[in-house]
Amino acid sequence: MENSIEKWRAYFDSANTDIFDIIENTIEVATWIVQSQKIFGEVLRIKEILDNSEEQPEALLIESLRRLQLMAISVETLKFTKVGKSVNGLRKHGSKQVRDLVKTLLWNWKNMMDAWFDATQAIADAEVEPKSVETSIIENEEEERVPSTPLDERSNRIEMKKLY
């Protein structure tokens, strides 16, 4: 039976790549995962503060909203945490400073979501085969393809509204 280190050595030798490149890429992915988890956890912590805004001092709300402004929050984090709904709940807060921060955050997130939807639509459009390119009957018989439904921009915009 072959030694497990020998199995790995053979695997990496056959990959035609430098082991150190693989290790470096693995470290980068692991770092990204750790950072994403920290951001996700911090967003959830802030969401809890915002959800209990009546019990929180104004200074804590302002600090929490500012932290959200400084964070590199992804579309996925916004979706999963639903922090947009918590922030939106403060639109009519008694403090003008809180209201202004809320307005700025929501405006920035809306622009980010619009850009994300536009990019998603562009990718979907690029994947659609032009009608001028016809495939032969033989190709169609050999390969049955189920067409994917094009993204509906309106439904994406409606979905975005659910985040707030």
Image (spheres, helix red, strand yellow):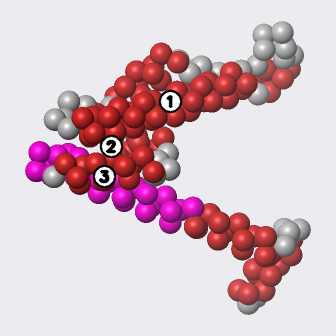
Q: Is residue 51 magenta?
A: yes
Q: Residue furthest left?
A: 55
In the displayed structure, 59 sits above or below 122; it is below
Which residue position is annotated with label 2? 83
Q: CA distance from mark 3 to mark 2?
A: 12 Å
Q: Is residue 99 visible?
A: yes
Q: Which mark is first along the chain, 2 or 3?
A: 3
Judge the density around disc 1: few (<14), some (14-19), many (≥20) Cα neighbours within 10 Å: few
Q: Is residue 146 visible?
A: no
Q: Is residue 146 left or right of residue 59?
A: right
For the point 35% across and 32% down, which residue is it?
103
Given contact means CB atoms under 8 Å apart, are the residues at marks 1 and 3 in contact? no
- Quadrant that contains the N terminus: bottom right
Q: Is residue 54 magenta?
A: yes
Three-letter code, disc 1: Asn
Q: Find numbered disc 1 in the image and state the secondary structure of the residue it sits on.
A: helix
What secondary structure is the magenta-colored segment mainly? helix
Judge the density around disc 3: few (<14), some (14-19), many (≥20) Cα neighbours within 10 Å: some
Q: Nearer the viewer, residue 76 or 130?
A: 76
In the displayed structure, 107 sits above or below 130; it is below
Three-letter code, disc 2: Val
In the displayed structure, 141 sits above or below 94; it is above
* Start-end of magenta stretch: 32-56
Q: Nearer the viewer, residue 42 or 143?
A: 42
Which residue position is annotated with label 1? 111
* Residue 42 rendering spot, x and y as whole percentages: 36, 58
* Residue 144 rendering spot, x and y as whole percentages: 71, 25
For the point 49% across and 45% down, which residue is it?
74
Q: Which mark is first along the chain, 1 or 2?
A: 2
Which residue position is annotated with label 3? 64
Three-letter code, disc 3: Ser
